[in-house]
Image (spheres, rainbow, N blue to C red):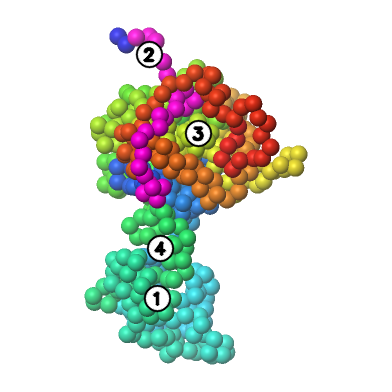
Amino acid sequence: IPEKFATLGLTYDDVLLLPGESDLAPDEIDTTTRLTREINIKVPLLSAAMDTVTESRMAIAMARQGGIGVLHRNLSIEDQAYQVDLVKRTQTGIISNPVTIGPDATLEELDRICGEYRVSGLPVVDESHKLLGIITNRDLRFTPVAEWAGTKVHEIMTKMPLITGPTGIDREEANSLLRAHKRERLPLIDPDGTLTGLITVKDFVKGEQFPNASYDNDGRLLVGAAIGYFGDAWERAGRLIEAGVDVLVADTAHGHVHLLLDMVKRLKTDPATKHVQVIGGNVATRAGAQAFVDAGADAIKVGVGPGSICTTRIVTGVGAPQVSAVYEASLAAKPAGVPVIADGGMKHSGEIAKALVAGADSVMLGSLLAGCEESPGDLVFVNGKQFKAYRGMGSLGAMSSRGKKSYSKDRYFQAEVKSDDQLVPEGIEGQVAYRGPLQAVSHQLIGGLHQSMFYVGARTVPELQEKGQFVRITAASLKESHPHGVQMTVEAPNYSGF
Ligand code: RVP
């Protein structure tokens, strides 16, 4: 029989990382990490699956910064799948399925297609998708509008031979070809001349702007989406996969539950779904993590109660201090090669490194990102200061219908509650200070992590996990850690004070 009182649980404010011997130059530090069994990302950050944090805009911004966004599920299936589609269509790499036109189409049709897809040029292909030429809407300028309906694409297109690249060309090579020939577009073809992709200069410029961006194998941004286990969850998963989602996140407040574990098992064995990465959660114990390892999850998310807007521990008395919970979960996950995600409770950048040393491979953030320009919701002014709304998915506001259907109730196992006044909330509704664009916020978070790694003497995340050593601290040390005895006169971009 286990002891009734387990060992003391610790959280972020209970520990500090000891400085270690370091001979690193800052540019040697690499924050690449494992998101799931099969996906690596360059920046170990996820944005939370919450309706005040992650919709497509945040997901695009997160992937561009090198992390990943998890689209919330307080949306109809159609709306959530549409959000996935928006992220996947954001062009920052190689376009694997470019819009094309046939040689016998008219210039009128060309103009319509360019407008519809907001592109300025199209590869011209025959019925078997062999590349015949390329046409841009600049070519239209030399033909009077009155003649568009009667002029065919093949009459004015630039015909083969064109400057093309082979299928599978890497970014550097493509870039130098575009430069050498001063071209704006590089069609990619197979040896038999079949069009397989398109690269545009515009996309490369974006690529250079976001050197860490998280891409799938086709050069599209990575995106995750939350699902449940109840009702139409299976249908939702299927639609999200059709839309191109890379990672499904089985998203509940208590993951160590048979229905959810069965859902993960089914997703990882069904031929239609098993190729997609599945994250299971949330758990806060070694046994909970082991259950997800056994169910075949590709990563495990840890956190019961640490969230800034969460009242689960107060309402139910259940939870586990986050640093200990992450450590415990990692004891089951690590030997199985399953990455761990520390979800909730991060107030400053220093906690990212603490979570990684405790055994996480990446972290999920809510309150730290809810104030970004890219999060859903409008700015609110209070006494001349700018804020954005931030609420728990278990808050009354998120779970109640208030004129529309709520899909987040089953995260708290209250899917069958009929009327709003019967709900038992486990979260609150509030607001956080406006923080500007994600780029600036993530710069501070990643910058902080770089510094942590420098202090510990770790070049890589695995090295940080191995070398990092905690010291337990007292309330007096915590006071010493924060600024003290001084009145702050200037706001720091990475310190909130609480
Ligand atoms: P934080 O970053 O501390 O704001 O926490 C965000 C996390 O809190 C989410 O990723 C989720 O796991 C959890 N959460 C979301 N809603 C609620 C709630 O209403 N209790 N909790």
Q: Quadrant of residue 354?
A: top left
Residue 238, placed above or below residue 86: above
Q: Main secondary structure of the magenta part?
A: loop
Residue 93 — which label?
A: 4
Amino acid type shown at disc 3: Met
Judging by the rendered image, the residue that carries numbered circle 1 is 179
Pointer 1 local density, CA inside 10 Å: few below 14, some 14–19, many at least 20: few
User: Looking at the image, can residue 124 be seen?
Assistant: no
Q: Which of 380 and 334 is in front in this view?
A: 334
Q: In this view, does 356 lie to the left or right of 489?
A: left
Disc 3 CB within 8 Å of nearest ligand 1 atom: yes
Q: In which quarter of the image is the N terminus?
A: top left
Judging by the rendered image, the residue that carries numbered circle 2 is 6
> Do callouts 3 and 4 mark residues in contact (Cβ within 8 Å)?
no
Residue 346 — which label?
A: 3
Amino acid type shown at disc 1: Arg
Amino acid type shown at disc 2: Ala
Q: In this view, does 255 lie to the left or right of 480?
A: left
**First-in-chain label (3 vs 4):** 4
Secondary element under disc 3, as helix, strand or loop, is: loop
Residue 117, placed above or below residue 234: below
First to last magenta residue range:
3-29
**First-in-chain label (4 vs 1):** 4
Label 4 – label 2 distance at C-alpha: 50 Å
Label 1 – label 2 distance at C-alpha: 64 Å
Secondary element under disc 2, as helix, strand or loop, is: loop
**First-in-chain label (4 vs 2):** 2
